[in-house]
Amino acid sequence: MSVPVNETLVRRAIEAIWNRGDLDAADQLFAAAYVNHDGLIADLVLGPEAIKISAALCRIAFPGLHISVEEVSTVEDTVVLRWTATTVPDRLCRGTLASKPKSLTGTTRSRISAEKIIESWTEWDRTGVLRELGIPVE
């Protein structure tokens, strides 16, 4: 696959699944044996279901989730995105209305084969997010 096609595939996954909540798009974009190495449920669920579960959990935990792609680079079969995720405070969280949008930056490296994403690694501030959700972190 060409560089522009690989980049388009990964951008489509961000827009359809993460931004619009179209979880069924994962069936078209991710391989049956896809491995989400660093997601919320890393390596526990394979295939499109891994992304469906991760996206659903994130969209529940962070109302108004939107991911903006800041930078893209592609080398051969690997696409690296630098992204910013923001949430819009549109409902009660832990009993109080959030006063301002939250944001988080990260990078995701996705490997592509046969026009499907076959594995990915994501780096982001897990500790900060867990603290924001009120989950104790050692």
Image: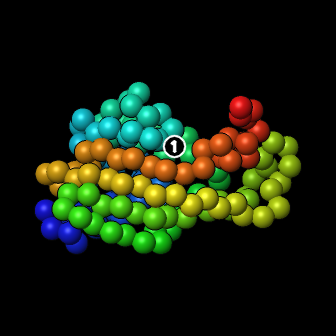
Q: Could you tell me residue 136's position as x and y percent? A: 75, 32
Is 19 positioned to the left or the right of 31 in the image? right
Outermost residue on the top side: it is 44
Kindly tell me whether residue 27 is visible in this rendering.
Answer: no
Label 1: which residue? Answer: 56
Q: Nearer the viewer, residue 104 or 32?
A: 104
Relative horizontal placement of residue 5, taking residue 44 as reference (left or right): left
Residue 73 picture quarter = bottom left
Amino acid type, residue under disc 1 in the picture: Ala
| Residue 6, image quadrant | bottom left
Q: Which image quadrant: the N terminus?
A: bottom left
Give x and y (percent) for residue 131: 73, 42
Q: Secondary structure at mark 1?
A: helix
Residue 135 pos. (x, y %): 73, 35
Here the colouring is rainbow
| Residue depicted at 27% across the width and 66% down the height | 74
Q: Quadrant of the C terminus?
A: top right
Image coordinates of residue 125 in percent, x first then y, are 60, 50
Q: In percent of the image, x 15 and y 68: which residue is there?
A: 2
